[in-house]
Image: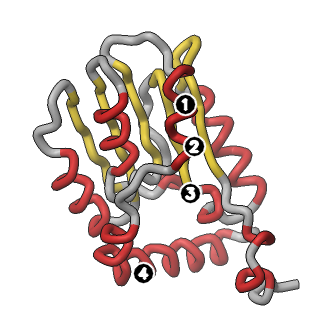
Amino acid sequence: MDAETIARLNAINRQFYAITAAEFDQTRGQPWPGWSRLLPHLPAAEPLRVFDLGCGNGRFGLFLRASYKGTIAYHGQDNSPELLAFAHSALADQPQMTVRLTEADLLDGLPDAEYDMIGLFGVLHHVPSHEQRRYLLRELAHRLAPGGLLAFACWRFMDYERFQKRLAH
């Protein structure tokens, strides 16, 4: 996929979340059911260093704070300033949790840091091209501490008729 197409797709994505951020926040407040299955696999680290790429309104951070017993150093990154404002409000003053929120596009680079847990939930479908998705996953894996956990989830578009109708051939 050429750079111009990637830039256009990213612009469409940013515009979508700028327009729908408030609705997204109102309808995306509950944790994903699968997140609880991660808890037994979290590394024993104090604090648990978490990178939540595509953090949106911060709900994964809230889930961790409610579910994890130790201290958490949470770093959320998203390209939507509107969603990051919701994340800031939601995550402010959480006990035993330091919070860092970064506005950046995931294709423009990742932090040069090491994490015990990296989450990438509902994000990969926003990354244009298979090559970019593979590159992103490799780069995230390189940022894991020894014994760290990289967890990601992908949409299953073909399970929904309304998305099948939109498929471009």
| Distance between the alpha carbons at the discs numbered 4 and 1 | 32 Å
Which is more N-terminal, label 4 or label 2?
A: 4
Nearest to the observer: residue 139 or residue 147: 147
Where disc 2 sits, the SS reads helix
Q: Amino acid at mark 2?
A: Gly
Q: Which mark is residue 122?
A: 3
Q: Which mark is residue 34?
A: 2
Q: Quadrant of the N terminus?
A: bottom right
Which is more N-terminal, label 2 or label 3?
A: 2
Nearest to viewer (mark 4 / mark 3): 3
Mark 4 burial class by Cα count in 10 Å: few <14, some 14-19, many 20+:
few
Is 22 left, or right, of 31 in this rendering?
left
Where disc 3 sits, the SS reads loop
Q: Are marks 3 and 2 in contact (CB under 8 Å)?
A: no
Which x, y percent locates residue 128? 67, 65
What residue is shown with label 4? 15
Which is more N-terminal, label 3 or label 4?
A: 4
